[in-house]
Image (cartoon, rainbow, N blue to C red):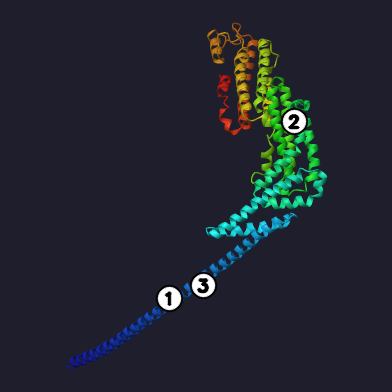
């Protein structure tokens, strides 16, 4: 009975404890929910404030951007208005200066420089009719002024040297003004000036003069070298350095010389021979190299070119003068390849006559093969000095022709049978084998080839191998030297096959 009462009391205590725990849990949950709800309300409030702040910042930055744009537009408008005022004043000032009789070219140069500067800044507004009219008026004034400058410079530069030196300041002022104008203004002035300077040369070496012919070609270059020294002493500091007047003078000399020589060689073609042609080309190329070297040393890479056609780099100077005169010899360089052809034909004929001559003991190669390739080497070296274009391609064809001739006439002809029934070395050895001349009986009493014949055969084979190897080198050298666009036409495969067979 006591046990049952104890259990009942314990159960009653457990139920009371569980009820208290449940009440506390509910209270905690309600408090947590209330806290979460409060937190959400605060977050919502913060987000709303952030949105309002962001909107305010966007409005503020939008206003700032509008103010910046307005400031730029205002600044641009003020600048443009100032430029328009400068342009108007510049045009009026140029009109007034051009009416003066004292030719104030320095003041005109300053005025024209300002007009060019502001006109470039107003390009985007040139759809405005008033500005278009103002620009056209400025261009019309500049065109009229350029005509005056050309006339003034022409009169000053073609006058007596003493008077030119007296008017040095006026010339320099005109040059500074012309430097601001279209490059064609100074090009026209300088072209006439250098032509006038070289008028004496054109007369001294015209086609009727004895000094005009190729035998006297050094006298042309000597005259020019002496003339340039005096020219630079008189005019070097007269013109702006970026006009490169000396370079223009030498280029005009090259053009005149090339034209005169071209006409002369056409009219006196029968008097041309290889020796004279090679002499003229050699002396001309030497002069061109000296000119290139001289202008490379004088070239200032920081100096701007006076016009788009002028040389502004050392490489351009080389392109300008290399071949400036010597190109006139190109149509006549066939004389050289014809001369090489005749020389090789004569050599081959001599070797053919000596093809059966006994060989010295210990000979490893036919002596003629070394002579042949030495001629080839010297001919190629000479041709490279003359031209690396079509003349070198013609020379390559001459080389190929005599490589075939050498293989067929000298190598086959040097074999014991003389190649009577053979079209190639293979055919010849097949013929020897069929006749019992080649095989295990070489050193027997019954062999048809003597020891001398056997030695000759070995020399021919060694010579063919040497020719094959050297022809490979020759082909590579030709392709290296010839102009790139002609490289594919250099082909000695057929000739190498002849030596290989």
Q: Quadrant of residue 21?
A: bottom left
Q: Position of residue 217 (x, y in %)?
A: 76, 29
Q: Position of residue 472 (x, y in %)?
A: 60, 26
Point 62% across, 52% down: residue: 140
Q: Position of residue 338 (x, y in %)?
A: 66, 20
Point 19% across, 91% down: residue: 8
Q: Nearer the viewer, residue 49 or 228?
A: 228
Q: Nearer the viewer, residue 325 or 371?
A: 325
Q: Which residue is mark 3?
A: 67
The numbered disc on residue 283 is 2
Q: Position of residue 421 (x, y in %)?
A: 55, 9
Q: Is residue 487 visible?
A: yes
CA separation, marks 2 and 3? 75 Å
Mark in front: 2 vs 3: 3
**Do residues under tags 1 and 3 come within 8 Å of each other at their CB atoms?**
no
Q: Is residue 386 left or right of residue 166?
A: left
Q: Is residue 387 above or below residue 318?
A: above
Q: Which residue is mark 1?
A: 55
In which quadrant will I find the N terminus? bottom left
The answer to which of marks 2 and 3 sits earlier in the sequence is: 3
Callout 2: helix, strand or loop?
helix
CA separation, marks 1 and 2? 86 Å
Q: Quadrant of residue 265?
A: top right
Q: Is residue 108 visible?
A: no
Q: Is residue 189 left or right of residue 139?
A: right
């Amino acid at each position: 009975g006591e046990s049952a009462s104890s259990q009942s009391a314990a159960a009653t205590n457990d139920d009371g404890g569980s009820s208290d725990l449940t009440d506390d849990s509910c209270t905690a949950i309600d408090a947590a929910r209330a806290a979460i709800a409060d937190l959400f309300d605060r977050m919502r409030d913060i987000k709303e404030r952030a949105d309002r702040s962001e909107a305010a910042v966007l409005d503020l930055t939008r206003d700032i951007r509008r103010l910046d744009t307005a400031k730029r537009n205002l600044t641009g408008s003020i600048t443009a208005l100032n430029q328009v005022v400068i342009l108007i004043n510049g045009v009026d000032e140029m009109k007034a200066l051009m009416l003066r009789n004292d030719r104030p070219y320095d003041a005109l140069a300053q005025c024209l420089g300002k007009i060019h500067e502001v006109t470039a800044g107003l390009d985007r507004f040139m759809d405005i009719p008033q500005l278009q009219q103002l620009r056209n008026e400025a261009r019309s004034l500049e065109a009229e002024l350029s005509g005056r400058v050309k006339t003034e410079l022409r009169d000053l530069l073609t006058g007596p040297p003493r008077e030119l030196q007296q008017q040095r300041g006026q010339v320099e002022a005109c040059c500074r003004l012309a430097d601001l104008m279209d490059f064609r203004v100074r090009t026209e002035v300088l072209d006439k000036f250098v032509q006038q300077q070289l008028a004496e040369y054109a007369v001294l070496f015209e086609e009727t003069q004895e000094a005009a012919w190729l035998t006297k070609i050094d006298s042309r270059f000597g005259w020019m070298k002496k003339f340039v020294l005096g020219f630079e002493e008189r005019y070097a500091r007269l013109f702006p350095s970026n006009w490169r007047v000396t370079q223009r003078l030498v280029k005009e000399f090259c053009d005149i010389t090339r034209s005169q020589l071209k006409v002369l060689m056409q009219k006196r073609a029968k008097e041309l021979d290889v020796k004279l042609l090679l002499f003229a080309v050699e002396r001309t190329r030497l002069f061109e190299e000296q000119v290139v070297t001289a202008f490379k040393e004088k070239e200032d890479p920081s100096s701007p070119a006076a016009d788009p056609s002028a040389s502004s780099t050392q490489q351009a100077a080389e392109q300008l003068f290399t071949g400036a005169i010597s190109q006139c010899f190109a149509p006549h360089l066939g004389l050289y390849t014809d001369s090489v052809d005749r020389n090789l034909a004569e050599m081959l004929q001599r070797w053919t006559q000596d093809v059966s001559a006994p060989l010295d003991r210990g000979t490893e190669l036919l002596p003629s093969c070394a002579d042949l390739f030495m001629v080839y080497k010297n001919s190629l070296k000479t041709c490279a000095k003359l031209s690396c274009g079509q003349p070198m391609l013609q020379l390559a064809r001459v080389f190929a022709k005599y490589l075939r001739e050498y293989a067929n006439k000298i190598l086959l002809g040097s074999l014991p049978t003389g190649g009577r029934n053979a079209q190639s070395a293979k055919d010849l050895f097949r013929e020897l084998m069929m006749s019992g001349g080649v095989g295990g009986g070489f050193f027997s009493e019954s062999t048809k080839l003597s020891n001398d014949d056997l030695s000759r055969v070995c020399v021919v084979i060694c010579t063919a191998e040497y020719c094959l190897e050297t022809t490979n080198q020759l082909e590579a050298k030709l392709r290296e030297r010839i102009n790139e666009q002609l490289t594919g036409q250099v082909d000695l495969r057929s000739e190498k096959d002849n030596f290989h067979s």
